[in-house]
Image (cartoon, grey):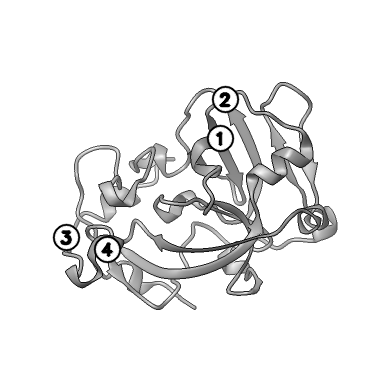
């Protein structure tokens, strides 16, 4: 069933970003100290003894890493700004986790394709370019602000995709599928842009839509 969120968010005037933030704040965004909690469906519950992250689509049998396996890989610290399509931005967020490049090296994987489909609970997918996942500020995130992720923010593992609207940073990540075909994910099939560059305002796949400036303020937050 098609999700109508893209159409639902076109009912109010667009906003103008504060010029005091210069080129750091993308157009149409509002800066906040909050960390809004947005997702579709219920927050999953996990038993880490039965949890794994799977990698497939590179011509051999799928490979998996447990949570403990991820903790044993080189840990990367990242500080970056994040930007949500619902018009909030948060500066200087701090994350830690494992860089995809280190995972590929540990598993001796050399992806042939240029794209990745990220599969997450609950029945969520988002398409990402491999080159974006290999950027220094992209990470398979295990923690935020020096603590393990909370369940609401994606524990035990989420994506952090540098330079893309935050829906690309899928919570509750379970599988990375490497492919040479760019296939739309969940939100991309429901009116959102394939590539999601916030500085180009790549919010939607069709006509430009206005998002109510207070949409995100109605959500729970940390």
Quadrant assignment, res 109: top right
The residue at the point 79 percent across, 27 percent down is: 61
In the displayed structure, 213 sits above or below 50; it is below
For disc 2, the neighbor class at 10 Å (few under 14, some 14 to 19, many from 20) is some
Q: CA distance from mark 1 to mark 4?
A: 27 Å
Q: Which mark is residue 29?
A: 4
Q: Which residue is mark 2?
A: 113
Mark 2 or mark 1, which is nearer to you?
A: 2
Q: Does residue 129 appear in the picture of this structure?
A: no
Label 3 Cα crowd, 10 Å radius (few <14 / some 14-19 / many 20+): some
Image location (x, y in percent) of residue 111: 64, 28
Judged left or right of residue 40, residue 109 is: right
Q: Secondary structure at mark 1?
A: strand
Total numbered labels placed on residues in the image: 4
Which image quadrant: the N terminus?
A: top left
Q: Position of residue 91 (x, y in %)?
A: 40, 69
State the separation of the CA atoms marked 2 and 1.
8 Å
For the residue carrying disc 4, how many other residues have a C-alpha within 10 Å: few (<14), some (14-19), or many (20+)?
many
- Residue situated in front as seen by the camera: 90 or 19: 19
Q: Which residue is mark 3?
A: 14
Between marks 3 and 1 in the image, the one whose residue lies nearer the viewer: 1
In this view, the residue in front, 66 or 131, is 131
Q: Could you say which disc has been placed on residue 116 in the image?
A: 1
Provide residue 191's location: percent of width, then percent of height. Answer: 33, 41
């Amino acid at each position: 069933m098609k999700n109508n969120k893209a159409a639902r968010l076109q009912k109010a005037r667009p906003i103008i970003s504060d010029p005091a933030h210069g080129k750091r704040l993308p157009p149409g965004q509002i800066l906040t100290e909050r960390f809004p909690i947005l997702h579709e469906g219920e927050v999953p519950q996990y038993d880490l003894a039965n949890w794994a992250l799977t990698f497939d689509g590179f011509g051999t049998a799928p490979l998996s890493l447990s949570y403990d396996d991820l903790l044993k890989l080189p840990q990367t610290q990242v500080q970056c700004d994040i930007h949500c399509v619902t018009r909030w931005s948060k500066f200087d967020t701090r994350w830690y986790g494992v860089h995809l490049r280190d995972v590929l090296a540990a598993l001796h994987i050399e992806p042939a394709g240029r794209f990745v489909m990220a599969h997450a609970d609950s029945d969520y997918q988002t398409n990402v370019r491999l080159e974006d996942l290999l950027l220094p500020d992209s990470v398979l995130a295990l923690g935020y602000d020096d603590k393990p992720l909370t369940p609401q923010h994606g524990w035990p593992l989420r994506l952090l995709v540098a330079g893309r609207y935050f829906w690309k940073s899928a919570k509750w990540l379970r599988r990375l599928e490497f492919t040479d075909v760019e296939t739309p994910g969940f939100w991309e099939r429901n009116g959102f842009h394939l590539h999601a560059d916030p500085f180009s305002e790549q919010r939607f796949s069709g006509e430009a839509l206005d998002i109510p400036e207070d949409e995100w303020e109605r959500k729970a937050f940390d």
